[in-house]
Amino acid sequence: MAYNVGDLTISIRKRIKDPSFDSSLILDYIQEVNNEVSNHNKMPFMQVDDNDYIAVESIDYDLSNNVETILSVRLVDETTGNFILPYFVPYPAFYDTYSVNTDQQSVTPSFYTLFSDTIIWPGKLDRTYNMYFKYLKRPTVLTDDASVPDVPERFKEIIIKGVLARVEEYRGNFDISAIHQRRYEDLVEDMLVKVNILPNGMSHKARFGQKSKIGW
């Protein structure tokens, strides 16, 4: 079977022994679990490397609507090979301290800020740069059976257990839901070890202290 919403729906219906359980509700639950897992801990499978040319005298750069969070930026002068690692300044501090003046002299972009989906430089760029940047992408919007979650196929049991916990809660089987929820949390912790986010043997709950909805 292909790894997609349709495949997951079949597996979940088999587990709950109800082949007619509302597929749209299962889709909603798959989306919830996918978002919940993908939005935490800078998951490697959510990281994207990209690059683009930034023209001389540019004062900003519009990111694609798939960008959730910028992780790093490197600007390379293609004529010399020299590079800059501009640091991030939060938007309020940027405008409290600096004024972006389109008439000012060109600047070397040693820092930047973000507003909405736009990178803003402290002035006109002094030259053309090739910008290499790493970002976290936004979770995929799952719309039908052919949609593929961001959580990799080798971790699909995480999605199944997370959905089962929600399904059983919906059906009023709270004890069974709690069992699936605990297994879901254990599988997430195992995944964090396997993708090298959490050292082996260290409890995610102990490391991060405050417990959230899924024990993070």
Image: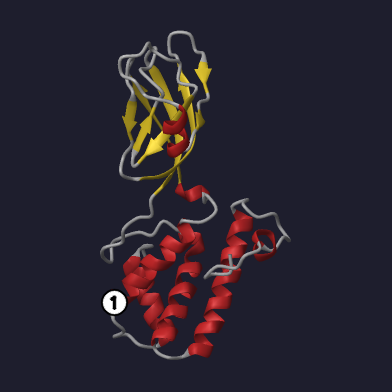
Residue at 45% across / 20% down in the picture?
109
Label 1 neighbour load within 10 Å: few <14, some 14-19, many 20+: some
Extreme-right residue of the structure: 201
Q: Would residue 152 appear left or right of 144 to someone viewing this image? A: right
Residue 216 horizontal/vertical position (percent): 58, 64
Could you say which quadrant of the image residue 185 lies in?
A: bottom right
The residue that label 1 is drawn on is 23
Q: Tell me: 7 left or right of 152.
A: left
Residue 187: where, in percent of width, then height? 58, 68
Q: Quadrant of residue 69?
A: top left
Q: Is residue 143 above or below residue 74?
A: below
Residue at x-position 49% and y-position 34%: 89
Of the 4 image quadrants, the one containing the N terminus is bottom left
Q: Residue at x 29, y 77 (%)?
A: 23
Establish if 186 lies above or below 172: above
- The amino acid beneath tag 1 is Ser
Extreme-top residue of the structure: 80
Question: Of residues 138 and 147, which is closer to you in this image?
Answer: 138
Q: Nearer the viewer, residue 13 or 59?
A: 59
Q: Position of residue 67 (x, y in %)?
A: 37, 43
Which quadrant holds residue 215? Answer: bottom right
Q: Percent x, y for residue 98?
A: 44, 26
Which of 156/42 is in front?
A: 42
